[in-house]
Every structure is written in structure tokens, then in C-alpha cells.
Amino acid sequence: MDSVARTVDGSAHVMASVCGHVRIQGTVTGLRRVFSARLRHCTVAGDRPDVLAHLADADLDDEVLACHLLAPPMPSLVMSRSLWRGVHGLPTRDCLLLDTKGRAETRRWWRPPPPELPLSQGAGPFGEALNRAVGVRAAAARNVSSDLGGFDSTTLCCLAARHGPVVACTGGADDPAADDLPWARRTAATVPGITHLELPLDQLPDAYAGALDSDEPPDAPCPTHVDRARFAAIWQAVAREHEPGVHFTGCGGDEIAGGTENHVYDMLRAPRSSWRTLRGFKAEARWSLRSMLAMRRDRRPYGRWLAEELGGGLHLPGTPDALPQPWGYPVRMPPWATPDAIDFVRAALRRLAEENDPWSRYRGQHCDLDMMFATAQEVRHHMRIAGRLGFALAAPYYDDRVVEAGLAVRAEERVTLWTYKPLLPAAVKGLVPDSVFARTTKAEGSHAQYTGWLAHRERLLALCEDSRLAARGLIDARRLREALGRPLSAFADSHIFEPTIACETWLRTTPGTTERRP
């Protein structure tokens, strides 16, 4: 089964039953999850933890819920835990094995490849894996649509157009510096087979418009839920006009085609071969040589780093200009978190530190996979929204084969400031027009977050009234109200608020979570 699982293109669960023995696994990034629970004398598995929790009459786990208040996203090995006691989230690198009597055990089956291939050798396999990931979905779909905006979605849209007609959609933006739309028009005019659907700004809800609403709650609190109404409006327009069978999104491209700056810790072990890339990071972040030498000397294993860096200062404000950490980003609890909530998170991180089992011995790879898992959980929520509209949302950058091919490329050539995402243009040369990669800008969402915040502040303040999080003893509603009433510091503050808003909305829309059980 290991060899079979390593040949599957696309994104799917893999299951086998042989003589009463069962093996079940999802995908490495967690886009396809596996959860299990013990019912009577048998282990039952599924991809919906809320369904298993209902069957098992399970209580909500406040320790895991408190972890979802962390900003930025918590480590994936904590995030993979289910929010219900007795419902177990399978680590995505493991498979679940059930014997003939329904007893369960787990076994690790996947490890990332060593990042040893030069770009000239690794780009081809990455491009082939990405093209297969798009082709296997396009071949099975009635109609195909795609996002068309930045590098990542544009690449997928162009690859899909090689397999048949594609309806590409681009939403308007109220930020004058956001230039996705003019670049999308150029691509649609250049690539045969693309029909461009432009959605004017006045037809799209702004950020936070649907922050407190949910037709169906996700598996866990989802920070991008604040943009739910905008996503839904775009996909509704596409579904209404073109009835696609599959819609491509570029989510995941930032992590696999780009990567995190944490790779500098691995590069500093071989500074001669990585010096050009290191110089770029040094200049951009204005690091001193002393700081770089300190990073090179930092050889702490994952568990020790987690215990020292994250376990002690959860209540302290972050430092924007701090050096990158070797194994991730310094997570912080919001100022309105209660001491009980902070204690819950410390306990969870302490257990994780004792396990001391990172994704990879390469610290940059570990951080990339951590970020992929976090963003894949958001796309899981988006997939359910799209499913209710009648089509499948596809995120090929999260496919196991694509992830493996991308991570096999040397970090100093894949993660660099001298060229934007150099892996992508090298991988799809001849398949995607060179003009796509002539762009030197990237639209970002801080302006939309800020204007949406101002427009919906009163609704957000209503969260403090009869707060479910406060009822469970996890936040101080008075301190949250005070913070919501102050001027917003653009993207930085919204990044801190969004997990709390997501948790509060999730509690209000998930059955059986209203009251804290003794």
C-alpha cells in the first residue's frame, strides 16, 4: 500500500481492506483528513470529526479550542488534534490500521524528500506533477473554471486551458495598488481557451460581511471565515453562469513554490553554496553578521525550541523585527485570553515538545509543511462551501506528488529573494506564456481587511455580548470589547482578531458547544 499511495495523482483518501484488516489515510497536507473514535467495542473512522463526536456523544475539548486562539496559526501537530474528547485526529503523515477486532493503531508512512535537487533537475518533475494534478481533474469534469489573479492561480488556469475550455474569474478590488485584474486580462487575451469573467467590486461583499454567519460550520474554527461571503459570491456567480464540475484555486502555491524564510537556518550550515540567497535575506531584513552567526549557532532540537520559545511567552506581544525562529513562528495568545486559556495552550505545547517529532530534520521543510497544513485546513472549509454550490474546489498545490516534487528542490534555489518563486516559471516553461512571469507585483489584502473592519465594527462588537468563549472561561469579554473599540492597525491587528472571531462564530454555529460541561 505504501507504493500504491505514492503513485496517486490528485487529492483523495486511500483505503484498503484485506482479509478484515483495514488501512486508511488522507493526504500529507491535511486537505483530506482522517478522524477516529471508539464506539462501543469498535473503532470508527471518518473525515468529519463533528459526525463522530455526535455518534460518540463527545464533549468539546477546551484545551484544543484555546489553541485555536493563537496567532499566527498554531503548530500543525497541535492543530491536527480534534476539538472533541475521544475523537482523534490522525497525523497526516500517518496511516490508520484497523485489525479484525476493530482495534486501531497508527504508523508513519510518509517522510519528505531531502532537498537536494538543483533547480535545473527538480523543476521538470515539479512541472510534470503539477500538470498531471490539473489534468486528472480537468479530464473528469463537465466544465472547468479557475481563479485568475496571482502567479499561482494563473499558472493553474493556463495549465487547465491546455486540457479544454476554462472560465477564469477575477474579482474587483478597492485597493488602487491591487493589479490582479489588468494582469488577468492580459493572460486571458494571450492564452487560447480562456473565457474571462470579471466580477465588479460593487457585486462583491467586503471582508467581515459574513464573519458571524455560517450555513454549515467547518471542522474547526477557520480564520479566513471572515472572507467567506466574498468567496461564496464569486463562486455563486461562476456556478450560476457556467455550472463547472471543478474550480481551481491557487492556494498552497506560496508555500511550495516559494517557502518560508526559516530556510536560512539550513542554508547557514552550508553558507558557501547558499551565500547569494543569504545575502538577499540579509539585505531585505537588515540582519547584522552577528545576528546571522547567532542563527548559525542555534542547533536546538524541535522539542527544546518549542518549550523555550513558545511555552514561556505566550502572553507577551510579538516583536515585528525579530529574527526568524528555527522551527516556526512565535505564536502568541491575544491580550483578552484568560489565564486558564494560556495554561491550556502551555499544556498542549508542553506535550508536543515532549514528543519532539518535527515534520523533517530540515527546519525550513518543517516550517513549509506546518504552513501548508494550516492553509489546507482553511481550504477544507472552502471546499464545503463550493460543494453546496454543486462543484468541486481543487487545490493542486496541496497534492502529495506536487508537494514531494517541490520539496525535493534545493532550498537556496527555491526560496530566494532574487527571483520571485523561481520554481514556477522553470517548471512550466513552454506550458505557460513567459509574459505571465514578467509581473513584479503581488496584490495583498490589508486594504480590504481594514475597510471591511470599519464597515462591520458594530457587528463585531456584538461578539462581546453573550460571548460563548467568555462563557467557557477562555476570554475576557471586557478586554475584547476595549480592543475592538480602538483604531485598527491595518493587517497586523486583524491577524490577531481573526482567530478569536473564528472561534466565537464556530461555537455559535456548531451544535452541542454552547455550554461548558462540568
Image: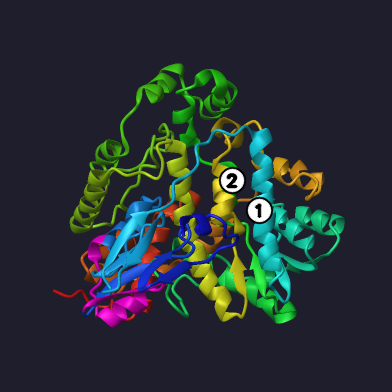
Asked whether the beta carbons under mark 2 and mark 1 sit within 8 Å of each other, the answer is: yes
Question: How far is the residue under mark 2 from the one under mark 1?
Answer: 9 Å
Residue 135 horizontal side relative to residue 360, left or right: right
Q: Does label 2 or label 1 sit earlier along the sequence?
A: 1
Q: In the image, what residue type sits under mark 2? A: Ala
Q: Quadrant of residue 396?
A: bottom right
Tell me where residue 327 appears, x and y as whole percent. 38, 39
- How packed mark 2 is, by other alpha carbons closer than 10 Å (few <14, some 14-19, many 20 or more), is many
Q: In the image, what residue type sits under mark 1? A: Leu
Residue 412 horizontal side relative to residue 84, left or right: right
Compared to 159, does 516 lie above or below?
Answer: below
Q: Which residues are magenta?
A: 41-63
- On-image quarter of the C terminus: bottom left
Compared to 472, does 424 lie above or below?
Answer: above
- Indicate yes or no whether the magenta region holds residue 57: yes
Any part of residue 209 in sight: no
- Indicate yes or no whether the magenta region holds residue 165: no
Q: Residue at x 50, y 51 (%)?
A: 491
Mark number, residue 405: 2
Residue 311 horizontal side relative to residue 215, left or right: left
Mark number, residue 54: none
Mark number, residue 130: 1
Does dot 2 land on a helix, a strand or a loop? helix
- How packed mark 1 is, by other alpha carbons closer than 10 Å (few <14, some 14-19, many 20 or more), is many
Q: Which one is nearer the viewer's eye here, 141 or 40?
A: 40
Q: Residue at x 69, y 43 (%)?
A: 124
Tell me where residue 343 appears, x and y as whole percent. 19, 53
